[in-house]
Image (cartoon, rainbow, N blue to C red):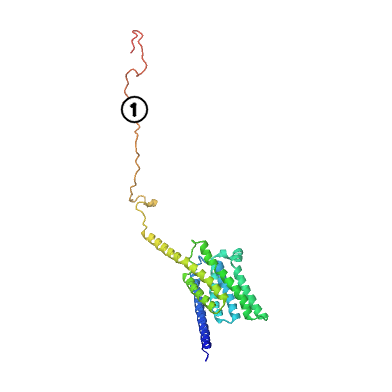
Amino acid sequence: MNIPALLDRDDRKWIMHSSALLGWFGAALSMTLPWPQVWRSCAQGRTGGLSATACWMGAAMPVGWITYGLLTGEIVQVVTNAVTGSAGLAVLVTILVKRGELRSARRLLITAAGAAGVVAAAGGSAAVAVLTEATGAHVATFLGTVLAVAAILSSIPQPLALLRDRGQDLAGLSPLRWRLAAGSCACWMAYGLVTAQPAVWLSAVVGLASALIVCWFLRPARATRTVAAVTVRAATLIIRPARGTARVVRPAGAAGEAATVVPRPVARPSSARIVRPASAAARSARPVTGPAAGPRTVRASRGVPV
């Protein structure tokens, strides 16, 4: 019995089982990760912080990976992306309904261009595989390259939006969804390395980096929102109206009733000046004698001044 041959066969079996395990574990995480976001956006109606471009790509990328799985015969790709595609489509419809500015022709041209390209590439690859003599493996190689580039580009908008505006509302982002995305990308990266699929592991590496960036942003944002909510609640409980600042106005019919008068402070002048009437000033005036009292009169007879 050839021992090296046995070892090689055992190694191949181990690699096959490991890759299958990684693939299905990554598939399980991928099928789980979008639903926290679906609950937050679709059920609770919270869409703040979501990138429209990322939502469009989240609905279009599963279409491309389903086509890729059909061309390569990987059922795990088809099942996984069928589930994630339905969740991504639900989030996309919700954000378009909640935020009307995203439905304008100009915004749709900007945000949905990449998604349209992915769907066109998937449809063209499927048509080539069906209508021509090209094998599914060759067509899958081309489509996998397109999807790898698209996955890299689709992973950029969400963290880029957070980096550009760090003070924006992040209530629409689910932290659990992005933690699961980091775990799923790590599994798909290992799966792509073990099965020698560069398109899979390369796109998973970029997705992992993107998920880690978003998780880093969501951690302090969540703590800030919690502290702010507690502060507002405490301020609501502590604040009381100041005494003596409220004034009660009674209707005219109750004017004759007894009323409680709240004394108010009266501003006193710093100095007062008393002005007497003219008659009182005349009575109290006395004649002034002396050289400056008035003009002198001279008696004509004696010439003596009076």
Taking 89 as reference, is 260 left or right?
left
Q: Quadrant for residue 226, please give it.
A: bottom left
Q: In terms of depth relative to the viewer, which is nearer, 106 or 197? A: 197
Q: Quadrant for residue 86, please give it.
A: bottom right
Q: In terms of depth relative to the viewer, which is nearer, 29 or 235? A: 29
The quarter in which the C terminus is drawn is top left
- Residue 26 is situated, as x and y percent measured from the top left of the image, at 51, 77
- Residue 239 is situated, as x and y percent measured from the top left of the image, at 37, 57
Taking 63 as reference, is 215 left or right?
left
The outermost residue toward the top is: 301
Callout 1, which amino acid? Ala
Does residue 163 appear in this view?
yes
- Residue 118 is situated, as x and y percent measured from the top left of the image, at 61, 72
The outermost residue toward the right is: 132
Taking 14 as reference, is 139 left or right?
right
Q: Residue at x 54, y 77 (%)?
A: 193
Taking 246 as reference, is 164 left or right?
right
Q: In terms of depth relative to the viewer, which is nearer, 259 or 245? A: 245
Q: Few, some or many C-alpha atoms within 10 Å of disc 1 (few <14, some 14-19, many ≥20)? A: few
Does residue 96 appear in this view?
no
Q: Which residue does the numbered mark 1 point to in the structure image? A: 281
